[in-house]
Image: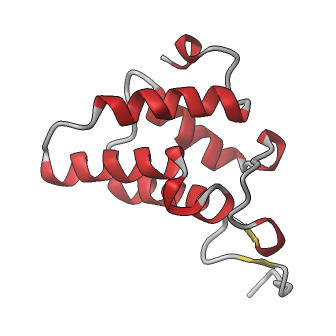
Amino acid sequence: MSQQQSPDNVSIDEIPVDIDNTQSAEVDPADIPDEIESITRGLAGEQPPTNPLVVLKAARWWYIHGKGGTDPAFQWAIEWARHLVTDTPSDVERFDAYLEYLVTVGLADDRHELR
């Protein structure tokens, strides 16, 4: 193991989990790891990720650092992973809530710049 983990900052993979900042109602865009931000933006784009494991990695981060199971980014990532695995249509209303949430969090100034 090349990196020590403290009790306040653990990780299953290379994406750190900040224990002190879990399931908060406030997500600071500066605290979002680059890889998670990239996946999150990709999920809002014209060509979203097609690997469910990549999508679930972002879902996990948003679940831990966002609002838990009610976090719109978590919910959309799970919805998109379900779509990828079952090839069933995704929920458009959930996608709209996701885009609005990304604006609220500060990942975009307007939901249209995400597409």
Residue 21 in the image, given as x and y percentages of width and height: 80, 65
Figure quadrant of residue 41 = top right
- For residue 83, above or below residue 95: below
Which scheme is used to colour this image of the protein? secondary structure
- Residue at 54% in and 20% down: 114
Residue 74 in the image, given as x and y percentages of width and height: 49, 52
Residue 13 in the image, given as x and y percentages of width and height: 61, 72
- For residue 71, above or below residue 43: below
Asked if residue 44 lies left or right of residue 80, the reply is right
Residue 111 in the image, given as x and y percentages of width and height: 56, 17
- Residue at 42% in and 44% down: 76
Q: Quadrant of the N terminus?
A: bottom right
- Residue at 23% in and 47% down: 84
Asked if residue 56 lies left or right of residue 16, the reply is left
Foreground residue, 61 or 99? 99
- For residue 34, above or below residue 91: below
Asked if residue 49 lies left or right of residue 23, the reply is left
Asked if residue 54 lies left or right of residue 9, the reply is left
- Residue at 70% in and 45% down: 34
